Amino acid sequence: MIINLTDVNKSYRDHSVLRNINLSIDKGETLAIIGASGSGKSTLLKLMIGLEQPSSGHVWIKDKDISSLREEELDKVRLNMGMVFQYSALFDSMTVADNVAFGLREHSSLAEKEIESIVEKKLHTVGLDQFGQYMPNQLSGGMKKRVSLARAIAFEPEIILYDEPTSGLDPVMAGKIDKLIKYTQEKMGVTSVVVTHDMNSAYYIADRIAMIYEGKIIAVGDAKAIKTSADERVQEFINGGRII
Ligand SMILES: Nc1ncnc2c1ncn2[C@@H]1O[C@H](COP(=O)(O)OP(=O)(O)OP(=O)(O)O)[C@@H](O)[C@H]1O
């Protein structure tokens, strides 16, 4: 396994957000995390990339327990991880190409020519060849998400974490993002964790789906197992509140 959470609890002051989380993710696997608003999905993702520390328990990324790492060591682990944030989190004052190049310029000793060639390839992968010199505010929401994905794969990380990659997108654009997530798994062997509200997306991209309910994982399994779960809370969620 490449990600392993053991007995993880997370509280903010006396507010318990995640409770007794045990979850392991295999190399090359795509795991979707579903659950209602406020159930703790984004917090779980932040723990996996060390943006938050667990109140108790451990978060292993390969052979490193990142819950106890110093910032410099954490940075090294993070170089192997890409993150696609909910609101794309692009630098508005930089061109698309500079956004994609940013991490490479900051954290690698690659020559500018090599960086430009990587940027070109990654923009091609996400279907934005012609947009390198655009500014983020000239792009649609779906295009911004694709730039964010190009930036995340620039380092060829082993792990990519996605926070709501298809939210706010029309079904066609959401489908394009889903295909790209699948592409990173199939062609690049990336391990992905995808927080989503979008059940169509979860069924399409994920090898396994984990459902969080009030800070606890109440179901984990493949699409079939989730669809046929006997747990009413799962049925209610996947049917959009309509028990059928
Ligand atoms: N930094 C923080 N300080 C205090 N409480 C927080 C903090 N971050 C998250 N929370 C609380 O933790 C709970 C879970 O939040 P989280 O963002 O993980 O939920 P979520 O499932 O991702 O929700 P959504 O689908 O709406 O994004 C919420 O009650 C939220 O208010």
Image (cartoon, rainbow, N blue to C red):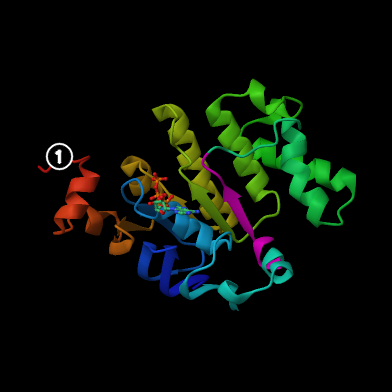
Q: Tell me if residue 65 comes above or below residue 82 in the rendering.
A: below
In the displayed structure, does residue 47 sit left or right of residue 91? left
Query: Which residue reaches farthest front?
Result: 14
Q: Residue 149 appears at what percent x and percent y?
A: 60, 43
How many numbered dots are placed on residues in this image? 1
User: Looking at the image, which is closer to me, 234 or 143?
Assistant: 234
Q: Tell me if residue 39 comes above or below residue 1 in the rendering.
A: above
Question: Do we see residue 127 in this rendering?
Answer: yes
Q: At 90% across and 50% down in the image, what residue appears?
A: 111
Q: At 43% across and 50% down in the image, what residue appears?
A: 195
Residue at disc 1, secondary structure = loop
Question: Do we see residue 120 in this rendering?
Answer: no
Residue 14 lies in quadrant:
bottom left
Q: Residue 234 appears at what percent x and percent y?
A: 21, 53
Q: Quadrant of the C terminus?
A: top left
Q: Tell me if residue 70 comes above or below residue 156 in the rendering.
A: below
User: Looking at the image, which is closer to me, 174 or 98?
Assistant: 98
Instruction: Say what amino acid the circle numbered 1 marks.
Output: Arg
Q: Is residue 131 in the magenta section? A: no
Q: Residue 141 appears at what percent x and percent y?
A: 54, 28
Q: Tell me if residue 29 comes above or below residue 202 in the rendering.
A: below
Residue 49 lies in quadrant:
bottom right
In the displayed structure, does residue 141 sit left or right of residue 25? right
Residue range of the region highlighted in magenta in the rendering: 76-86
Q: Residues within 10 Å of mark 1 (few under 14, many from 20)?
A: few
In the displayed structure, does residue 226 sit left or right of residue 87? left
Q: At 18% across and 58% down in the image, what residue appears?
A: 229
Q: Is residue 81 in the magenta section? A: yes
Residue picked out by circle 1: 242
